[in-house]
Image (cartoon, rainbow, N blue to C red):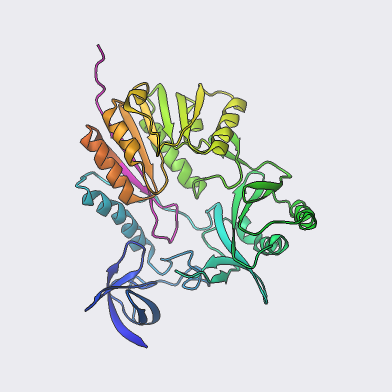
Amino acid sequence: MSVRFTIRKLGSQGDGIAETESGDLFIPFTLPGEIVTAARERDRATLMAVLEASPLRVEPACRHFTECGGCALQHFETEAYRRWKREKVVHALKGKGIECEIGELVACAPQSRRRVVLAARRTDAGMLLGFNRHLSPEIISISECPISLPEIVAALGQLRALAELICATTKSFRMAVTVTGSGLDIAVHESGKLGEHQRRIASNFVIAQGFARLSIDDEIVIEPRKPVVMFGSVAVAVPPGAFLQATEAAERTMAEIVGGHLKRAKKIADLFAGCGSFALRLATKSEVHAAEGDAAALSALDRGSRFATGLKRVTGERRDLFRRPLTFKELNAFDGLVFDPPRAGAEDQSTQIARSDVPYVAAVSCNPVTLARDLRILIDGGYTLTSVTPIDQFLWSPHVEAVALLEKPRKRRG
């Protein structure tokens, strides 16, 4: 049964929130001020109809919106959406008592996302390939995706056919597709074990379609061309399933902000370095020590630096920075530092940075809440927060990136 609700505000995940006698009710795809009908189930509800629409409601860019769970906010007017995203960073910092001038949100263009993770499953009606419905395991087959690079959208038919060829399970599986300079890099997980005949057919298909690589559960099935991405002027052959920033434009913006802050540093530590998106750009002017827990990513960074020209010395260290962060004594060998951890942040590593006397620090994060926690640690350790720039590289989602810059007067050493 559907009930009438008034939307009070947007929640942190982009759902509209209605107040009820039993607490807040979360209704996806609604906006503040709207009157809607929705079918309730505990603290969540499915939108049935919008009775009174917000003036900020706009026509979604995609026919799959509200079915596909890939986007949460296509119905939100652009400027209001951007203000909401920026406010997520402001709110998180205020929650930790941090006052700082927050820059304007760096916008994300449609059709710019270079990596998507598709869901696939074989059914009696054929192969499903798309995204999961909002908060559901159901797969919504897609024929368009306005956030993704055109190369991915143009290949949806071929990717669906490839999923059919490699499927050896009755369950759903994941297909991560990345646009590289060499073609599409396709990393599949949990599709089942391929037989030799299936493997040959899939390999021939990959070659015929001009894909760069197919890997299944991190094992390379076939690699007609090494998938290469550019970090500044340095070409890096990335490993299967490698972490990359969602869009090239956002990556460049973050690298420019970080590079500008660390321009005086002669020796820089890059923590959670990945394949080198920061390290290899910074190495054009400074010596860089890259610490990363993933061996394949660190190896790609190392190969990229060795074959590049015009770089200062780049060293690498495989290190689990969650279990064994660089100590403040180790960090004191550097006069610049950047760290870009996963969503969980870098609490223990931040504690060591706070005790160090590294004068210039750049903190990059895709989670404003853990960023605020880590910044609080650094500020309490004597750092001054000079700027925070929010960056929208996850278009129409509730996620937002941010780059925070900090400084500390360096202690005189006797």
Can you say which quadrant of the picture contains the N terminus? bottom left
Residue 117 locus on image (x, y percent): 55, 57
Given residues 31 and 290, the one toward you in this image is 290
Residue 206 locus on image (x, y percent): 74, 53
Instruction: Identify the residue at the far bottom of this view.
Output: 1
Given residues 401 and 213, the one toward you in this image is 213
Quadrant of the image occupied by residue 47: bottom left
Is residue 100 toward the left or the right of residue 233 in the image?
left
Q: Is residue 323 above or below residue 208?
A: above
Residue in the picture at 43% in, 37% down? 256
35 is within the stretch colored magenta = no
Can you say which quadrant of the picture contains the C terminus? top left
Q: Is residue 245 above or below residue 348?
A: below
Is residue 263 toward the left or the right of residue 280 in the image?
left
Residue 52 locus on image (x, y percent): 32, 81
Residue in the picture at 36% in, 81% down? 38
* Res. 233 in view: no
391 is within the stretch colored magenta = yes
Magenta span: 388-414
Instruction: State the count of labels.
Output: 0
* Res. 281 in view: yes
